[in-house]
Structure formats: C-alpha cells, structure tokens
Amino acid sequence: MVYRILDANLNRSREGLRIIEEWCRFGLNDASMAETCKNLRQEVARWHTPQIRAARDTVGDPGTVLSHSQEEQRSSITSLLQANFCRIQEAFRVLEEYGKLHHEEMGKTFKQMRYQVYTLESTLMGHQRHHLLWQSRLYLVTSPADSLLTIVESCLQGGLTILQYREKTADDMVRWDRAKKLRELCRSYGALFIVNDRVDLALAVDADGVHLGQQDLPVAVARELLGPQRILGRSTTNPQEMQAAITEGADYIGVGPVYETPTKPGKAAAGFDYVSYAARNCPIPWFAIGGVDMGNIHDVIKAGAQRVAVVRSLMEAEQPTLTTQYFISQLLRK
C-alpha cells in the first residue's frame, strides 16, 4: 500500500513539474527556471524505481473516477500555474512523510525539494506578474460604488488585466473584506490586483502589489515589506518625480493628471507635455491617468500614451464590458 501511495505521488509531482516547466520554457523563455524544473523532475524520477512502479494498480484505483469541478477548467495561465504548484507541493509532502517508511533519505530529500518548489513558485509568480504588467494596456482604479463587484467583473469580462482598489474613507474591516473579494475576482480572471496606498492591506489579502502616491511610503521601504516579487507603482506629475520613482525601483508609474479631474481635486493638470516626455524617456511601464475617457482617448494616444488608467470612465459606464473592450481596442491599434 505504501508503494502505491509513493507511485501515485511521484507521478503526480512529475506531471505537475512538467506543466510548470513548459510554461517557463515556451511561455516565458526563461531557461534558468525551466532548468530548475527539469532538475527537480529528474530527482523525482531517480526515486521512481521499478519496485515502486510495480505496485501500481490503475484499474483498482478508486481515485481515477473522482474529479472536482475546479479541475475541469482553468480561467487563466495564472490559475493553471497556481493549481499545479499546489499539486506538486501536496505530492511532495506526501512523499516526504510516506517516504520515511521506504528509505531514510527519501523524507529528507523531498522536504528540501518542497522548499525548492516554494522558492520556484515565488520567483515564477513574480515573473508572471511583471510579464502581465508589461502586457496590460488598460488599468481600472476603483471608486466607491454599491455595485463595485459587478462593475469590476464586467470590466474583467471585457479584457481588463489590472485593477487597483482605491477607497480612502471606509473602515479597515470593510476595506479588508472588499479587497479579499476583489482579489479573488481578479485571480479568477487572471488579472493583477493592486491596493492603493496600504502595504498592510495588500499583504493581508495577498495582493499582487501596491500603488503609492507621492506622500506615501518611500518605494524602497515598501519594497522591503512586500519583497521583490510583488509590483510597486508610484504616482508622478512631472519628469523629476518620474526619474525619482525609476531610481527608487518602482515597477510602473502613473503619468498625470492628463486633464483636471474630481478624483484629484485641486491638482493642476500635467497635460500632454508630460505624457510626451514619458513616451520619450520612461523605460518602465507607465499609464496616462486623469480625466481620460472615450472622447479624448485618441488625443492621449496621439501624445504618446500606449497605456491608460481610468476611474469614472469605467466605474460610471453604462456598459462597462463594451467600454473596456473599446479602450483596449484603441490602445492596441497604436
């Protein structure tokens, strides 16, 4: 019976590792992570001896007819990767425990391999976050709304790939609950979930990153708290702030406000000059923000923007899905 358990979990872990390896190799073109997966697979194969294989009884295994609805579909590459990392880690834990009954070194080996997989997951998911950031064209920053989740899901259905939860006045328990729900929604659609200002809230809900204003924590401090794998954004209004954010290690910046907007009362518009400057000089992803809507999007694109962030244009849209699709289609035409 122990050999059957070992055989099943050796197979399971090798299959999961192969799925991760294929994405590292062909999806990300990352030779280093692909090699890590390959080496782990080969170590697993070393323990998959003929003696253990001989215990296999596929016909008599009741687990072959069991399935769960969550296994029957994957909504995104991110959900696929996360599911297979869980699969590998669970299998390695089983091999660590039952392996002690087979060979004194097997438990120790799979314990160390399990920690290697944790590190690989952190590295790969961080890589995946940044890969998606570079691909994203439209960024929704939320404002308080009774139908917040419905609006956000409609935008995600239209192709939105990055969302920032921004709510300045709600109690922390309310923000925590909404942030958790939004994170799960984004995760189910394979979109990035960013929290405005609050590093603590981002960590509490396992967000993909934090967006910081000029009066918030320094980027370096936030990076130390969040670690290297999460995304850090910074609002900027002029070339000096842009350069400071890049030097501090921001992963992306907001460029604006392009137009005066009630979202930032009392703040003068940075205008097209700053958008054009960013287009010529910013080496990291940047999003033109501030009053951008369907009526002026072409002017913003003409000034040099390839990515935009919006609030009211989607939060107050009559048809958020179609509006999202329109924005993305125009930004991809450039």
Image (cartoon, rainbow, N blue to C red):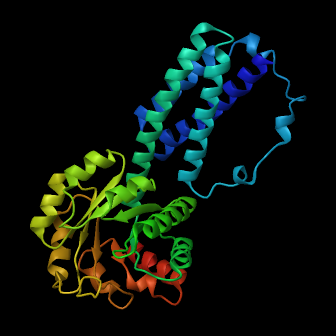
Q: Residue at x 69, y 55 (%)?
A: 73
Q: Residue at x 45, y 64 (%)?
A: 176
Foreground residue among 38 and 180: 180
Residue 310 position, x and y percent, is 36, 79
Q: Which corner quadrant holds the C terminus? A: bottom left
Residue that protrudes farthest toward the left in the picture: 240
Residue 320 position, x and y percent, is 51, 82
Q: Residue at x 62, y 33 (%)?
A: 90
Residue 19 position, x and y percent, is 59, 39
Q: Is residue 52 placed above or below 280 in the rendered structure?
A: above
Residue 114 position, x and y percent, is 52, 28
On the picture, is 107 further left or further right than 169? right
Give residue 88's quadrant in the image: top right
Q: Residue at x 53, y 71 (%)?
A: 156
Residue that protrudes farthest toward the right in the picture: 60
Q: Which corner quadrant holds the N terminus? A: top right
Give residue 59's quadrant in the image: top right
Q: Is residue 74 placed above or below 169 in the rendered structure?
A: above
On the picture, is 5 further left or further right than 152? right
Q: Is residue 162 visible?
A: no
Q: Is residue 137 visible?
A: yes
